[in-house]
Image (tube, helix red, strand yellow):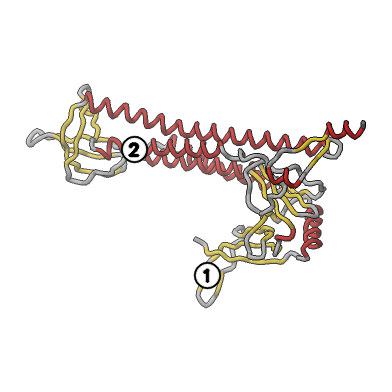
């Protein structure tokens, strides 16, 4: 009777075909409660990040779409109600300043236009000009490039952002991962249940706070694009867009560093973060190196210059026998004693000790 009750309480984890074939069976007696809870948290976390990425892509796509719609409506209004004439480009001292001469001798006059860009304009060449009937001082430069290049570029940017959101919505939807996926490839799906080990290391707090500080540069670029009015509209919007992209990348890097965890047991090692996971077997590891990457210059007869302080990065790299990086981690993983235990376990399972290697990279 007790055997029947235990069989009814057994739970098959329907992850994928590989796990079903391998016959992995966890009962509610055998599976630790904490592992099952942590797995649920990871699944929810990846879902939340996927939703945030989709909403962020759509919100960013709405900005160029709205600006493009406004530009198209403005162009149709100009074509419909403004008076068309011809002018000659006399001066182009700035990106958003063009001086035109309109009319026929001797009744010519000069007007100033503020185009979005100067593509299609040349000195002393004729261009179509639109004059506002209610205010003759308001002038709009016509032509295919002047009227439609900027809205087209904005629509393409919106399409790219929507496509990015569609791609982000598919991340992690391939189903739960299999324990047999130990190839060293980065997986965007939620990881298998946590390893049954107490060897877990994390990045120090400074490594996830630093990208937040660097994101202030993106905020400065965005502020310049919004509040510095001396430049043209297109350069200002491009500068603001660069600032937004830089801030988002730095925030994503901060989240990745904050949630990075590396664990190891007698079978292999796993790296997880908010954006996915990868796992390797000890048999795959062909080298363990403490790599120092130095940005410097090569001088004939003298060799490489000594790198300037602060221009070197150090990391611990687990690579296969062909030199392909399997797992890369910070040189300052914490706790320190647990990091030493991880390296000792690696030496026990692979016979490899960590070696030092300095790599010089030419400074751009």
* Nearest to N terminus: mark 2 or mark 1: 2
Task: Say what secondary structure mark 2 lies in.
Answer: helix
Task: Say what secondary structure mark 1 lies in.
Answer: strand
Q: Along the line of sight, which residue is nearer the eye, 10 or 281?
A: 10
Q: Along the line of sight, which residue is nearer the eye, 270 or 53?
A: 270
Which residue: 28% across, 29% down? Answer: 75
The residue singled out by tag 1 in the image is: 298
Query: From this viewpoint, is residue 36 visible?
Result: yes
Query: From mark 2 to mark 1, how far is it between C-alphas?
Result: 43 Å
- The outermost residue toward the left is 106
The residue singled out by tag 2 in the image is: 150
Nearer to us: label 2 or label 1 = 2
- The outermost residue toward the bottom is 301
Give the position of the N terminus as an image quadrant.
top right
Which residue: 55% across, 73% down? Answer: 303
> Does residue 179 appear left or right of residue 224 in this picture?
right
**Number of marks present in the image shown:** 2
> Does residue 219 appear left or right of residue 323 in this picture?
left
> On residue 224, which mark appears?
none
């Amino acid at each position: 009777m007790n055997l029947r009750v235990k069989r009814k309480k057994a739970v098959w984890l329907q992850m994928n075909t590989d796990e079903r074939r391998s016959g992995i069976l966890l009962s509610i007696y055998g599976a630790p409660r904490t592992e099952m809870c942590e797995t649920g948290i990871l699944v929810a976390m990846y879902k939340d990040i996927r939703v945030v990425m989709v909403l962020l892509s759509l919100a960013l796509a709405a900005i160029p779409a709205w600006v493009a719609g406004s530009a198209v409506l403005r162009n149709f209004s100009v074509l419909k109600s403004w008076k068309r004439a011809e002018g000659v480009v006399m001066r182009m001292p700035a990106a958003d300043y063009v001086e035109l001469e309109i009319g026929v001798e001797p009744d010519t006059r000069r007007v100033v236009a503020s185009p979005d860009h100067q593509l299609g304009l040349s000195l002393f060449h004729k261009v179509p000009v639109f004059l506002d009937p209610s205010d003759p001082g308001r002038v709009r430069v016509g032509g295919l490039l002047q009227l439609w290049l900027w809205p087209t570029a904005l629509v393409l940017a919106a399409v790219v952002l929507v496509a990015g959101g569609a791609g982000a919505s598919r991340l992690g939807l391939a189903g739960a991962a299999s324990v047999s996926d130990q190839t060293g490839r980065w997986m965007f799906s939620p990881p298998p249940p946590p390893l049954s080990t107490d060897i877990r290391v994390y990045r120090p707090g400074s490594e996830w706070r630093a990208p937040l500080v660097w994101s202030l540069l993106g905020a400065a670029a965005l502020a310049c694009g919004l509040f510095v009015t001396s430049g043209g509209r297109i350069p200002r919007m491009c500068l603001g867009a660069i600032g937004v992209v830089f801030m988002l990348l730095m925030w994503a890097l901060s989240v990745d560093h904050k949630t990075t965890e590396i664990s190891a047991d007698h079978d292999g090692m796993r790296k997880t973060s908010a954006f996915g996971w990868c796992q390797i077997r000890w048999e795959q590891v062909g080298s363990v190196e403490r790599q120092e990457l130095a940005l410097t210059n090569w001088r004939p007869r003298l060799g490489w210059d000594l790198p300037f302080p602060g221009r070197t990065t150090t990391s611990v790299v687990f690579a296969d026998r062909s030199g392909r990086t399997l797992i890369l981690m910070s040189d300052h993983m914490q706790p320190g004693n647990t990091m030493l235990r991880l390296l000792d376990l690696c030496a026990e399972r692979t016979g490899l000790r960590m070696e030092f290697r300095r790599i010089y990279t030419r400074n751009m």
